[in-house]
Amino acid sequence: MVYERPWKTFQQQLDLLVSHNLVVSDKTAALNHLQRIGYYRLSAYLYPFRVFRIQPNFQVVKENEFVANTHFSDAVNLYIFDKNLRQLMLDALERIEVALRVDIAYLLGERDTYAYKNIDQFHPTFAGKNKRHANWLKKYENLLKRSKEDFVKHYRHNHGADLPIWVAIEVWDFGAMSQLFSMMKVPDQRKISSKYGVTDFKVFSSWLRSLNYLRNLCAHHSRLWNRNVIDQPKLPAPGEISWCDHYLGKNELISKPFLLINIVAHLLSIICPATKWHDRLIQQSDEFPEIKSDRKVSINDIGLQDGWKGLIGR
């Protein structure tokens, strides 16, 4: 297939949107937003307002037209709300990532200064033909080469090529940390997961994997609101963590981002018991923009459920 759509000026982009029944009350401001945010990024926030028609064969077809009274400002306001929500997530995810790096380094470093390089410190299934540990080491070396940090040069110049695990953790990204955790021996995984109130280490490992997915979405400025989550986390057994019970059997909520946000709040409440992050999250949810379009969308599209404010971080 050949892509045949031509390049368009910002004015042509705006004219195209207007021709599809989009209301633009301030054309100067709209052009400014197209120049700063981009047509394609804004189109993700306009997508819910497209007209969908059911064909005689019951197939749903997306039309280019927008539903009545859909304003350009609806997309811009949703984008701004989503951007602020992502920034809130990144703040919490940084604290979670740093704390878990320390947990891993403290536990493994007591036994072996260079534990991350020693396959004997990990579950045997990740050695030999599996090569997961070897592949992880390659990823670590790439992160090390890309690092511009002075401490890397300092340690390598003064102490040799290999960094102690409590230093090496500072070049890991969330994915490297999550992958290493999944390779650890079961007793070690249980020791760390139990610190965060999760007795099933497999559940906790799935949480870290899903939070890495969330972190990548936020770090790369991808839409978080109204998204279907691809990498879904597991839930603990009924009764183990009270707020998790509210998601059991509710696939429509498990597939939405708020479950991941709830996990973030849970971990952060243990790492920083006095944190006000939960209050900031509630405040951000209250700032969901007023939508002018006849098709109403809401903060609930992120996967909220009744009474969520009383459950978050509890």
Image: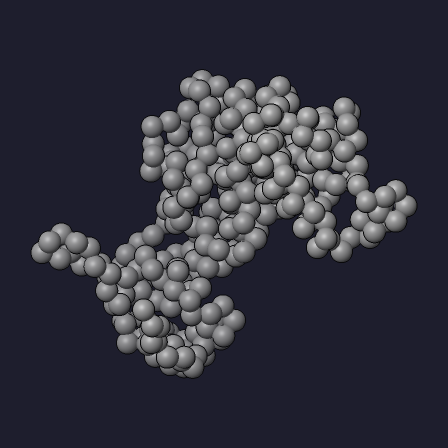
Q: Nearer the viewer, residue 99 or 241?
A: 99
Q: How many marks?
A: 0
The picture quadrant where one finds residue 98 is top right
Residue for point 28% across, 76% down: 19
Using the rendered image of the protein, determine whether residue 94 is visible from the camera's viewpoint. Answer: no
Q: Is residue 6 above or below residue 63?
A: below
Instruction: Indicate left or right for 39 with 205 as reference.
Output: left
Residue for point 40% across, 49% down: 227
Q: Nearer the viewer, residue 248 or 272?
A: 248
Quadrant, the N terminus: bottom left
* Image spot of residue 182 (x, y percent): 57, 31
Residue for point 37% across, 79% down: 6
Instruction: Indicate left or right for 57 with 9 as reference.
Output: left
Q: Is residue 145 above or below residue 201?
A: below
Q: Nearer the viewer, residue 232 or 279?
A: 232
Q: Give the residue at the far front of this rendering.
A: 129
* Image spot of residue 274 (x, y percent): 66, 32
